Image (cartoon, rainbow, N blue to C red):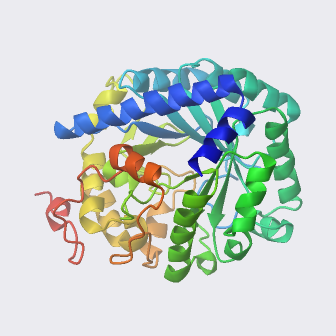
Amino acid sequence: MMLKMAKRMLFEADKRLLWKLAWNMGVKGGMSVLRHKSRLKRGEVFPPFLYVSIINSCNLRCQGCWVDVAHKQKTIDPPAFRKLIREAKQMGNSFFGIVGGEPFMHPQLLDMLAEFPECYFQIFTNGHFITDERAKRIRELGNVTPLISVEGTEIISDERRGRTGVLSKTMQGLQHCLNNGVFTGVCTSLCRTNIDDLLREVWVDRLIEMGVLYTWFHVYRPMGPNPNADLCLSPEQAMKARKFVVEMRAKKPIVIIDAYYDGEGQALCPAATGISHHINPWGDIEPCPIVQFSKESIHTTAEDGRTLKEKFLKSDYLRDFRAVAAEATRGCIVLERPDLLKALVEKHGAKDVTARQTALAELAAMQVRTSQYSPGNEVPEKNLLYRIAKRVFFNDFGVYNGKDHSQTAAPGVLAGK
């Protein structure tokens, strides 16, 4: 399988783009993780991977979306983006996830990314705005990979995403990327209405035949002002998804990403481990995209002249979030223990950084659900390369050591002790 994957990379991918990926994301991204591990030994956390929502607007209205897509448009402007990337680079960062809303609705998106050829950017997109011309520009830049979301059949896509003709427009954008030799991925938010259509070997085979080089199956999370609990996977379906990913990694020549398990199959939370945090369109620094409360901002004011490094390293709120999350569960604290998150937000006076200003009430009303943490049901990686890579570059970094998740979590942190 690995030989087939190597053959695909060598013969299907543009060599210049492959080099950009290998160097900017592979080598430099790996070095940024090693710096993260070194900082952790000093009790310092600056995430090696930052996800940046550059705009809140979107042309779709997806079920359960937590982004204020219908509110007044807010974007991160080029000067603020430039300052953010430069300060993150000083900490060794080279990879950035670009999210929204729909990133391609930002009028300066590709111009902003063009300023940093030494970095690598993954754009999470529905693909509707990727024309042939834009795909050519992406290939010209070489440091950008679109991750295009496919949410099911034509009927299911329209239902999930609140518009008509969604799938055909998405597939057109995807095909523009593939026609121009762009290093392209496809992701799916697995839910009850699409799991039987897309969590299938035949779908993975179709992606390979099309020329897609990587894919990502993540699990739907009921968040925001209108969470749709009916879409949630059952624990059995979530386990089915984990087993499917492990099996496909061992037999298919396509890279399959996941962000919630280590090489031994143990669950983890990227925000709890400090490997990633999120920045919203207003510049607020959040633990992750679904934790929409913040005490810090990337913007510098006359009252607050701290650097980005100082804001991350000295944030009591972010530090306590990581501690509470790690003590509570190896899974998602938002789903499993919303009460603890609410108490943490109130303790620190973290502000609701949504446009709708209802995030705290939404948190208080959340129903407790299972997440990726299922003790005793770990599914280790079968692909040796994935397993080794995760041991070195993607694991819990020791944050869960000694934690007993069978007990009520984090009383000391929440009490301020």
The answer to whether residue 140 is seen in the rendering is: yes
| Tally of marks | 0
Q: Is residue 232 left or right of residue 387?
A: right
Observer-nearest residue: 230 or 152?
Answer: 152
Residue 8: percent from left, percent from top: 69, 41
Q: Quadrant location of the C terminus?
A: bottom left
Q: Is residue 252 left or right of residue 409?
A: right
Quick check: 144 above or below 317? above
Observer-nearest residue: 23 or 297?
Answer: 23
Q: Residue 192: which quarter of the image?
A: bottom right
The answer to whether residue 128 is seen in the rendering is: no
Residue 111: percent from left, percent from top: 68, 21
Quick check: 133 above or below 185? above
Residue 238: percent from left, percent from top: 52, 74
Q: Residue 81: which quarter of the image?
A: top right
Q: Is residue 357 left or right of residue 348?
A: right
Observer-nearest residue: 50 or 393?
Answer: 393
Residue at 62% of width from left, 35% of height from top? 75
Residue at 23% of width from left, 40% of height from top? 40
Q: Is residue 403 left or right of residue 5?
A: left
Observer-nearest residue: 194 or 241?
Answer: 241
Residue at 39% of width from left, 77% of height from top? 377
Residue 305: percent from left, percent from top: 33, 22
Q: Residue furthest left?
A: 417
